Image (cartoon, rainbow, N blue to C red):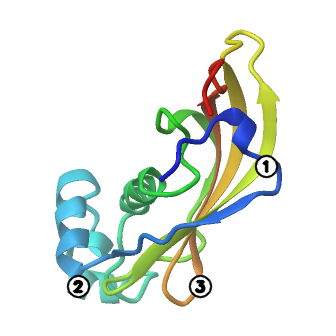
Amino acid sequence: MSERYFEDFAVGQIFVSTLRLPVGKDDILAFAGQFDPQPFHLDEQAARHSIFGGLVASGWHTAALTMRLVTGSEFRSATGTTGLGVEQLRWPAAVRPGDELHIESEVLELRPSKSRPDYGLMKMRIRTLNQRGEVVQDLVSNELVPRRPAGAP
């Protein structure tokens, strides 16, 4: 992975992750047991009678998996991903056992930081998709990205 600075990004640029993360039943149960203990995340029988019609991952589990995909992607900046906030977070489809997730990230806006001249601000849309290409999470976030230091390639 090459180091990317603010100057290396362009509005409209799209990055597709090569990393794929499988989501297993045990992963869903473990995350839910610790962080989101609701019946449709923990109990297959209860989940069958829920709005989901079966066991599903917590949206927060999906968000955590997305972060793992972000940190392993090509669009990550030279110093890592420093988030400043989320403008939108939606889960239009559920993540189910056996799904395999990847991300598509698009640069929406770029502007130099007024308060931190060695950084720029980047607005990104990060869509998390399953193996069928269905969007399971749609996230718009703002990132702090380092500017290229003098003398850096």
> Does residue 97 appear left or right of residue 13 in this picture?
left
The C terminus - image quarter: top right
Q: Quadrant of residue 72?
A: bottom left
Q: In terms of sequence position, does the residue under pointer 2 or pointer 1 come before the other?
A: 2
Q: Find numbered disc 1 in the image and state the secondary structure of the residue it sits on.
A: strand
Label 1 amino acid? Leu
Q: Nearer the viewer, residue 138 or 32?
A: 138
**Location of residue 52 with respect to 74 vertically, above or below:** below
> Does residue 137 appear left or right of residue 10 in this picture?
left
Mark 3 and mark 2: Cα distance apart in space: 25 Å
Q: Find numbered disc 3 in the image and state the secondary structure of the residue it sits on.
A: loop
Residue at 43% from the left image edge and 52% from the top image edge: 67
Which mark, by number, is residue 148?
Answer: none
Image position, residue 2 (x, y; %):
52, 48
Q: Which residue is mark 3?
A: 133
> Does residue 8 appear left or right of residue 90 in this picture?
right
Q: Nearer the viewer, mark 2 or mark 1?
A: 1
Q: Nearer the viewer, residue 133 or 91?
A: 133
Q: Nearer the viewer, mark 3 or mark 2?
A: 3
Image position, residue 85 (x, y; %):
59, 34
Q: In terms of sequence position, does the residue under pointer 3 or pointer 1 come before the other?
A: 1
> Does residue 4 appear left or right of residue 120 in this picture?
left
Q: In terms of sequence position, does the residue under pointer 3 or pointer 2 come before the other?
A: 2
Label 2 amino acid? Glu
Q: Which residue is mark 2?
A: 44
Which mark, by number, is residue 108?
Answer: 1
Mark 2 and mark 1: Cα distance apart in space: 39 Å
